Image (spheres, rainbow, N blue to C red):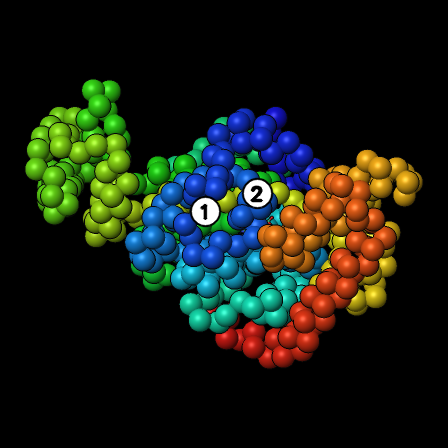
Amino acid sequence: MKIDPWSSTTYQNYKRLRDEFGIEEFTEKIWRDLPHPHKLLRRGVIFGHRGFQLIHDAIKNKKPWAILTGLMPSGKMHLGHKMVIDQVIYYQSIGADIHIAVADIEAFATRGYTLDETKHYALTEYIPNYIALGLKPEKCQIYFQSQNSDVKDLAYLLGKKVNWSQMQATYGFNGQSNMTHIFSPLIQTGDILHVQLEKYGGNRPTLVPVGVDQDPHIRLSRDIAQAHRLYNVIKTRDDKIGIFLKTDENIPQLLDTAEKTIQKLNFKELKQITEYKAIYINDAEEKDIQKIDEALSKTETKQGGYGFLPPSATFHRFITGLTGEKMSSSKPESAIFLTDSPKEAAKKIMNAKTGGAVTLEEQKKHGGQPDKCVVYELFLYHLIEDDKELQEIYTSCRNGKQMCGQCKKYASQLMGELLTDIQTKRKTAEKKIKQYLE
Ligand code: TRP
Ligand code: SF4
């Protein structure tokens, strides 16, 4: 199995994806003690992560951390697209600084849009909707890939540590693939890592909330971040913690800096072995690795490196389309667009595929199947904040107390309220766009 970020497959078996690609499970343990955890976190919609512990600890210890995500502006924005920005707004409310890439180069390379078309969609659809949904301008920057030379420079420079075999194996590129497409994952790596440049806030934990189709880019960015480090902190075979240099230049000076840095963290039993380009710390344990690594990362930029901390990511499930297939802009009846009128939305909901039984009688007897119902998904992903109320709907559906007709009406009513609210706020949103662009 391969994840292809540019195909339109939907992924059904999320557990298998996790197992096969080494994505960690996003368990209750990791979100429970965050401030007012968002419903997408609480309800298992975020099903996996890489390196979220770093983010968790930054939040707990009130240290700076960043969000970086990107949007591919292709046509109108629907409920599926809303999920990423819902998370971004939540993370902004708990202290992250926000960076959003408009992936115009990628849209050009992989979807055949011109840069002007993408710009148009970003400025008239996505960004106004983000503002209407509640994204604040403070500590928030939205930029276009094609306009950000720091991102593009990084893409070129960081590409030095990736070779063609790796790109082929990761993305299935071949002799027919065009160069702009081949290069676009490096632009995305530039997006993800540029927020750790001094100018954008320096080395700090960065979270990239995405759909699981983006995992190849996440793996690439994490590999590249690691490959450009000067120091590598690991547990050695004899259960000690070791720091190893990854470069052959300035060895004595780099080891000296490392030693001083570790002493400041109060470790005392250090052994430097210059031939191995290593320092062993006898009084450190595995749980100290993160702390040591973060401290060393901060010294790297002064020594000619980048000091990138590995970017973290969360992966969310995709909302099912109203027709039971993928929610897609190219099939308007499958999607609710944020610009749909309440009436249009209601019509789509009334035609949606539910988990109801064939006849009313049967449903009263055996109940419905909320787990297979897209109307229930609307409640779960977008319409109901209160977990108790959601649970009640689930139970009364399972018990056969709630029938699909009345349920759809309720969903339509809530959807109407949501859309009206967004559309009212959008009226003033376009005037505010400037505050978000660099
Ligand atoms: N590739 C993403 C998509 O298809 C868009 C994107 C561009 C992105 N740069 C990013 C996502 C950086 C996350 C992080 O939608
Ligand atoms: Fe879905 Fe509601 Fe019907 Fe249950 S009653 S199957 S939740 S529409």
Q: Is residue 334 left or right of residue 313?
A: right
In space, the residues marked 1 and 2 are separated at their CA atoms by 11 Å
Nearer to me, 136 or 198: 136
Q: Which residue is drawn at 66% across and 74% down?
A: 426
Estimate how packed mark 2 is, as few (under 14), some (14 to 19) or many (20 or more) residues with alpha carbons within 10 Å: some
Q: Is residue 307 left or right of residue 377?
A: left
Q: Where is residue 67 in the image (x, y as percent from the top left)?
A: 45, 55
Q: Are marks 1 and 2 in contact (CB under 8 Å)?
A: no
- Sequence-earlier tag: 1 or 2: 1
Residue 413, picture quadrant: bottom right
Residue 288, picture quadrant: top left
Q: Position of residue 43 (x, y in %)?
A: 58, 46
Q: Where is residue 343 in the image (x, y as percent from the top left)?
A: 83, 66
Q: Residue at x 24, y 50 (%)?
A: 298
Q: Name the residue under label 1.
A: 31
Q: Can residue 24 be seen in this view?
A: yes
Query: If the image is split into quadrants, where does the N terminus sit?
Result: top right
Nearer to me, 323 or 429: 323
Residue 315, picture quadrant: top right
Estimate how packed mark 1 is, as few (under 14), some (14 to 19) or many (20 or more) residues with alpha carbons within 10 Å: some
Nearer to me, 366 or 435: 366
Q: Can residue 279 be seen in this view?
A: no
Q: Which residue is drawn at 26% across and 36% down?
A: 287
- Which residue type carries mark 2? Gly
Q: Does the residue labelled 1 lie within 8 Å of ligand 1?
A: no
- Is residue 15 shown above or below 222? above
Circle 1 sits in a helix, a strand or a loop, which is it? Answer: helix
Q: Is residue 344 left or right of residue 185?
A: right
Q: Where is residue 388 in the image (x, y as percent from the top left)?
A: 61, 52
Circle 2 sits in a helix, a strand or a loop, which is it? Answer: loop
Q: Mark 2 points at which residue?
A: 44
